[in-house]
Amino acid sequence: MKKIILIGMLYVSAIGFSQQKMISKSGKITFEGSVPSFEEVKATNSSVTFVLNPATGEIASLALMKGFRFKVALMEEHFNENYVESDQYPKATFKGKIEGFDLNSLAANPKDFTIKGKLELHGKSKDITTTARISKSASGISITSDFSVNASDFNIAIPSLVKSKVSNKINIQIDAVLK
């Protein structure tokens, strides 16, 4: 009986090790909600975690909301306290799948892939479909993507006082190298 349990445990361990995940803890997300003729509303978080299972194409990311940095400190304070309420909703997550992903087909020239998944932010979830440019180099797998979301889809209210200065449409850029 002990031999059967030991063999079973070794088998499960082998399966677990064969599905090695690729990780980045220094991925970058930049978002912009600027409108023409007003001050730039833009922030970057350079400590975003990305995880890719190359065998299945499943991808996930985690961004701490207090990690976003603005040019103007007051904007950062308003972002955390009034818009995304970082103390109550400290993170944004994405879980999805890269359609048709094949690690062996990647090269130095970026290839376009469709990513479908769920973005969770401010306690709300939204299905996201975007195109990502993915390439392979000596430093790892590079993933870049651009897409837009509406702040209102995540119950992020823009006060009427600044509605003309901050866009409801938020443009998001992602850049990560996974190893």
Image: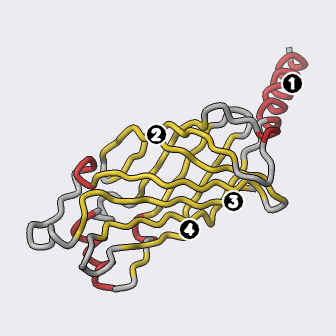
| Residue that sits furthest to the top in the current view | 1
Image position, residue 137 (x, y; %):
81, 57
Residue 94 % position (x, y): 48, 46
For this orientation, the residue located farthest to the left is: 160
Relative vertical location of residue 69 with respect to residue 171 in this rendering, above or below: below
- Tell which tag, 3 or 1, sits nearer the viewer: 3
Say which of 34 and 9 sits in front: 34
Numbered label tally: 4
Circle 3: element type? strand
Q: Tell us which disc is closer to us: 2 or 1.
A: 2
Q: Earlier in the sequence, mark 3 or mark 4?
A: 4
Residue type, numbered disc 4: Ser
Tag 4 near tag 1, CB within 8 Å: no
Residue farthest to the front?
37
Q: Residues within 10 Å of mark 3 (few under 14, many from 20)?
A: many
Q: Which residue is mark 4?
A: 47
Which of discs 4 and 1 lies nearer the camera? The answer is 4
Q: Quadrant of the C terminus?
A: bottom right
Q: Are marks 3 and 4 in contact (CB under 8 Å)?
A: no
Compared with 127, 48 (above or below) is below
> Could you classify mark 4 by the number of other residues whose Cα lies within 10 Å: few (under 14), some (14-19), or many (20 or more)?
some
Callout 2 secondary element: strand
Tag shown at residue 177 = 3
**Marks 3 and 4: which is nearer the front?**
3
- Marks 3 and 2 sit apart, C-alpha to C-alpha, by 20 Å
**Residue at left offset 69%, top offset 54%:** 23
The secondary structure type at the circle numbered 1 is: helix
Task: Quickly name the residue at label 1.
Answer: 6
Kindly report which numbered mark, 3 or 2, lies closer to the viewer in this rendering: 2
Q: Are marks 2 and 4 in contact (CB under 8 Å)?
A: no
Q: Is disc 1 surrounded by few (<14), some (14 to 19) or many (20+) residues within 10 Å? A: few
**129 relative to 40 in the view: left or right:** right
